Structure formats: structure tokens, C-alpha cells
Image (cartoon, helix red, strand yellow):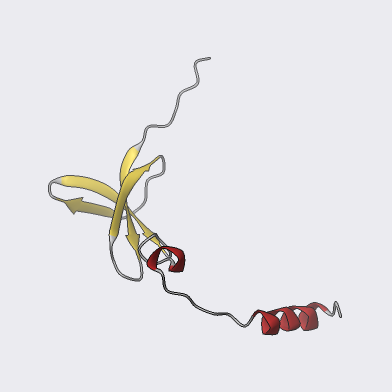
């Protein structure tokens, strides 16, 4: 088995809401390049990370599920 694996490159995940960075590795390059302390990272913008997700931050947001279900049923005429 001589399968070649893709090389892991350093990447910085930026949270869109609070601009915090998470560092990791990926096999996919992005167009944005971030230089930080002499190191180069490809930058990937994330909508939700552990810094902004309600489960990790402890903040809760209540959603009117009943209204959403009725809207879905009305749109697709299920009931």
C-alpha cells in the first residue's frame, strides 16, 4: 500500500464573532495567509467555535420551535 497522504499544514481558525484564534492543522490551504510571531498560518474564518458556541460559553438562546414547525408545515402544506 503506497498511498500518499496529504501533508498537514498549520492553520489558524478565526472566530468571526470575537476574532479569537484557534490553531491546528489541515490538509486544505486557504487564500488568506496570517503571519504571527515569525510563523505563517493559513487563516480560515469560522462562524462558530468553542469561543462563541452557546454550549461552551454557557449562554442560552431560546427559539420559538412551535412557530418554526408551523411555518414549515404551512410552506410545504403537510397539515
Can you give x and y, in whole percent of width and height, for residue 9 in the image? 33, 39
Quarter-of-image position of residue 43: bottom left
Q: Residue at 34% of width from left, 53% of height from top? A: 31
Can you give x and y, in whole percent of width and height, for residue 19 in the image? 29, 66
Q: Which of 61 and 44 is in front in this view?
A: 61
Q: Which of 2 and 57 is in front in this view?
A: 57
Q: Residue at 54% of width from left, 80% of height from top? A: 62
Residue at the far front: name it.
58
Q: Answer above or below: position of 56 versus 42.
A: below
Total labels drawn: 0
Can you give x and y, in whole percent of width and height, for residue 54 in the image? 44, 69
Quarter-of-image position of residue 44: bottom left
Q: Residue at 74% of width from left, 78% of height from top? A: 72
Position of residue 46 in the picture relative to residue 38 (left or right)? right
Q: Residue at 35% of width from left, 71% of height from top? A: 17
Position of residue 40 in the picture relative to residue 31 (left or right)? left
Quarter-of-image position of residue 56: bottom left
Q: Which of 42 and 70 is in front in this view?
A: 70
Residue at the far left: name it.
37
Can you give x and y, in whole percent of width and height, for residue 21 in the image? 28, 58
Residue at the far top: name it.
1
Q: Answer above or below: position of 44 versus 17.
A: above
Q: Answer above or below: position of 59 versus 4.
A: below
Q: In which quarter of the image is the C terminus?
A: bottom right
Amino acid at each position: 500500500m503506497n498511498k500518499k497522504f496529504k501533508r498537514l499544514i498549520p492553520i489558524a481558525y478565526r472566530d468571526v464573532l470575537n476574532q479569537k484564534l484557534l490553531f491546528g492543522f489541515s490538509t486544505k490551504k486557504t487564500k488568506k495567509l496570517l503571519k504571527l510571531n515569525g510563523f505563517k498560518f493559513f487563516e480560515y474564518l469560522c462562524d462558530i467555535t468553542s469561543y462563541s458556541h452557546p454550549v461552551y460559553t454557557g449562554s442560552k438562546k431560546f427559539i420559538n420551535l412551535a412557530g418554526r414547525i408551523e411555518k414549515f408545515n404551512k410552506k410545504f402544506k403537510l397539515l
